[in-house]
């Protein structure tokens, strides 16, 4: 059983949703990013999404866009992103790691080589936001052959006609983008999200995790009651930004502050037990 399957099975047995965190690899520095990622499981993260820095993150709002630019300026790249995963696996062999980002860096790296290298360091899944399901065989087939899940995105505009195409070949879980627009935007209502999750689950047995717009423990709790996973990214990335000095270097205590905030979000998810 994969790490992702084991994780969702475990949290379901605990009658709760998985707490999924997102941070950008290399933000604000490689060393600080590594320290944050290593600390996320103890702060309550069940699954870690690690953003692959890219110069033009078109689906991301200002917080994650700025994080990607900070990381790139600090020397981030695919090799250093994989190094963070490799270092993480030396300490933690059970928490799933999903790399999230855009296809261009994978294409530049070499898709087959990337899948081999990612599997070797312990990557469990990929979310490639600009690669439509009709065109993802170039990545999905070698990724699956290497034991890596390719996670598909569904949105409020994914109707019952579109969903079978989105779900064909999907694995790991389904990432439901709760609002139309970029990351860090407005939140959808819990009622709308519950209806969307129910509709998606009528088409698949995969877990459904919900992201975009979750910024507080209370929102995380509400999502945890209606979905299999709650994803928080921009709020955590904003905490990293708030902990930087005028040169974009970490202030003393930044990592602790980020992890303390993450713990509050995790507690919110855990409070949202299923009815």
Image (spheres, rainbow, N blue to C red):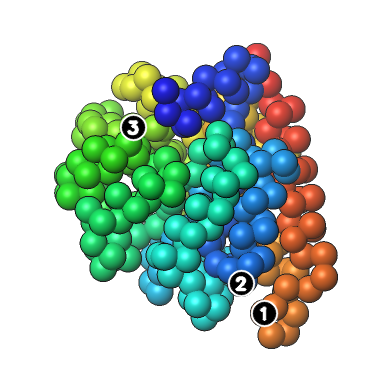
Sooner in the amino-acid sequence: mark 1 or mark 3 = 3
Q: Quadrant of the N terminus?
A: top left
For disc 3, the neighbor class at 10 Å (few under 14, some 14 to 19, many from 20) is many
Q: Secondary structure at mark 3?
A: loop
Question: Which residue is denoted by mark 3 in the rendering?
Answer: 171
How many callouts does the rendering have?
A: 3
Q: Is residue 89 left or right of residue 271?
A: left
Q: Which mark is residue 4?
A: none
Sooner in the amino-acid sequence: mark 2 or mark 1 = 2
Residue for point 48% across, 31% down:
3
Q: CA distance from mark 2 to mark 1?
A: 9 Å
Q: CA distance from mark 2 to mark 3?
A: 32 Å
Question: Which residue is denoted by mark 2 in the rendering?
Answer: 29
Residue 228 in the image, given as x and y percentages of width and height: 53, 27
Q: Secondary structure at mark 2?
A: loop
- Residues marked 1 and 3 touching at CB (< 8 Å): no
Instruction: Name the mark nearer the viewer: 2 or 3.
Output: 2
Residue 169 in the image, given as x and y percentages of width and height: 24, 33
Question: Which residue is denoted by mark 1 in the rendering?
Answer: 248
Residue 198 vertical placement versus 21 (above, below): above
Sooner in the amino-acid sequence: mark 2 or mark 3 = 2
Residue for point 43% across, 49% down:
121
């Amino acid at each position: 059983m994969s790490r992702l399957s084991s994780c969702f099975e475990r949290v379901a047995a605990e009658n709760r949703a998985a707490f999924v965190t997102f941070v950008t690899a290399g933000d604000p520095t490689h060393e600080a990013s590594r320290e944050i990622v290593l600390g996320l499981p103890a702060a309550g993260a069940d699954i870690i999404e690690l953003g692959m820095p890219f110069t033009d993150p078109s689906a991301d709002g200002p917080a994650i866009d700025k994080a990607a630019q900070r990381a790139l300026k600090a020397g981030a790249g695919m090799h250093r992103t994989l190094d963070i995963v490799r270092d993480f696996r030396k300490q933690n062999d059970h928490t799933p790691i999903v790399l999230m980002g855009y296809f261009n860096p994978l294409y530049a790296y070499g898709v087959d080589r990337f899948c081999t290298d990612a599997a070797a360091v312990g990557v469990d899944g990929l979310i490639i936001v600009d690669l439509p399901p009709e065109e993802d065989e170039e990545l999905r087939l070698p990724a699956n052959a290497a034991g890596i899940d390719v996670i598909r995105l569904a949105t409020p505009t994914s109707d019952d006609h579109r969903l079978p195409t989105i779900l064909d070949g999907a694995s790991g879980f389904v990432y439901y983008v709760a609002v139309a627009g970029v990351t860090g935007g407005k939140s959808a209502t819990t009622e709308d999200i519950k209806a969307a999750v129910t509709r998606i689950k009528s088409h698949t047995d995969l877990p459904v995790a919900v992201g975009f717009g979750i910024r507080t423990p209370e929102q995380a709790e509400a999502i945890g009651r209606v979905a299999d996973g709650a994803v928080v990214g921009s709020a955590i990335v904003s905490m990293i930004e708030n902990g930087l000095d005028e040169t974009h270097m970490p202030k003393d205590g930044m990592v602790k502050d980020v992890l303390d905030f993450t713990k509050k979000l995790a507690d919110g998810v855990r409070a949202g037990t299923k009815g």
